[in-house]
Amino acid sequence: MKRVVVKLGTGLLSDKGKINASVISAISGEIAFLKKKGFQILVVSSGAVGCGMIKLGRPRPKNISDAQMLASVGQPLLMDMWMRAFSKRGITGAQVLCSADDFSDRKKYLNLRRTMLKILENGILPVINENDSVTVDELKFGDNDRLSALTASHIEASDLVILTNVQGLYVDGKLVGELKNIGEAELKSAGPAGKFGTGGMRSKLLAAKITRLAGCRLTIASGKTRGILKKILIDKKNPGTLILPSGHIKNRKRWLAFGSICRASIIVDIGAYNAIAKNGRSLLAAGITGAEGVFAKGDAVNIVYGQKSFARGIVNYSDSEVRKIQGCQSPGISKLLKRDGDPEVINRDNLVLINGDGPL
């Protein structure tokens, strides 16, 4: 059974100052057809803040409290449209509201996965959105393109289809049919967000960095095209821009690379940098020169060389213990801590490269 995430942006859903219920109705009909063909579908729907803006006649919010207020007004209106459209087609829908903390905290991450899979197993269709009414800046995804990519990675979807109001990515005025890599030229060609949205084409390309490592195909296409989901998922046609996967790394490492939020760092020397970044080794105490911030055993931390974070990992020691053993050879750790210690501060199986050539 194929799992597919379908994301709809606010720009697609809004039309002349109103939320376009006809788009929701049309996509719901396509989803009903796909479900009958054996697909498991998850919808990531933007539009809560946009619905609130339209309902109250307000401009784009300039601060977090205004955005939260508008989302509180708009979210039930948005969900009501989705639930009505699904109900007409005999589909039971479910609302799933997430914050970045649900992905960054490992326990919440795994619990969210279990919940979404249980919803799908029961033939229910989840509609996912960021919980904008209570989310604060430091715990925001930034846009629903990233949320949809994290969701696709989370439940190991075969495809993520991002439906927007344009046909796909254009570079120098030409539609890009397929991408195997995401370079600076593509990112520079990406446009800004629209009036009601927060994403834009650039955020879709950044989302593809997540799906590519999850073994998931990402298609950017126009949601205004009739039968668009059937064309992509059943007919295997490419009506927009297809971004191909580059491999498939373990879920735990994908979480480390993209879902985890690291608020502390371990600083290393050139030897440790080379061992980790070039040779795929674990982080040993001997290569550590310092630690910044507070962390406990089992937390995700950044690994820094010079001024740059180049990796993330799940640490086997607290920050105070790391400061005690930094620069120490592994056999001497137990003596310094006065207890049995792990020879590795971060094992390579719990470590992933970032901002580099990809995960270890």
Image (cartoon, rainbow, N blue to C red):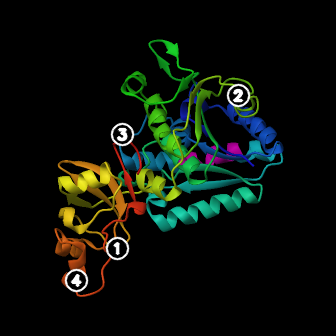
User: The residue tagged with tag 4: helix, strand or loop?
Assistant: helix
Can residue 164 be found in the magenta stretch?
no
Q: Earlier in the sequence, mark 2 or mark 1?
A: 2
Nearest-to-viewer mark from 3 and 1: 1
- Looking at the image, residue 34 lies above or below residue 69: above
Where does the magenta region start and end?
73-82
Which residue has dot 1 on it?
A: 297
- Does the magenta stretch mainly form a helix, a strand or a loop? helix
Q: Position of residue 145 (x, y in %)?
A: 51, 40
User: Helix or strand or loop: what does disc 1 sit on?
Assistant: loop
3D distance between C-alphas at marks 2 and 1:
47 Å
Q: Residue at x 57, y 61 (%)?
A: 112
Toward the viewer: 22 or 296?
296
Q: Please indicate, yes or no, whether residue 49 appears anywhere in the rendered image.
A: no
Q: Residue at 78% across / 40% down in the picture?
A: 34
Image coordinates of residue 116 in percent, x first then y, are 64, 58
Q: Earlier in the sequence, mark 4 or mark 2?
A: 2
Camera-side mark, 4 or 1: 4
What residue is shown with label 3?
62
| Residue bearing mark 2 | 228
Q: CA distance from mark 4 to mark 3?
A: 50 Å
Residue 305 appears left or right of 141: left
Q: Amino acid at mark 3?
A: Lys
Q: Toward which corner of the image does residue 292 lie, by quadrant?
A: bottom left
Secondary element under disc 2, as helix, strand or loop, is helix
Q: CA distance from mark 4 to mark 2?
A: 61 Å
Q: Earlier in the sequence, mark 3 or mark 1?
A: 3
Residue type highlighted by circle 1 = Lys
Kind of residue at badge 2: Ile
Verify CB contact (< 8 Å) between mark 2 and mark 1.
no
Q: Which residue is mark 4?
A: 337
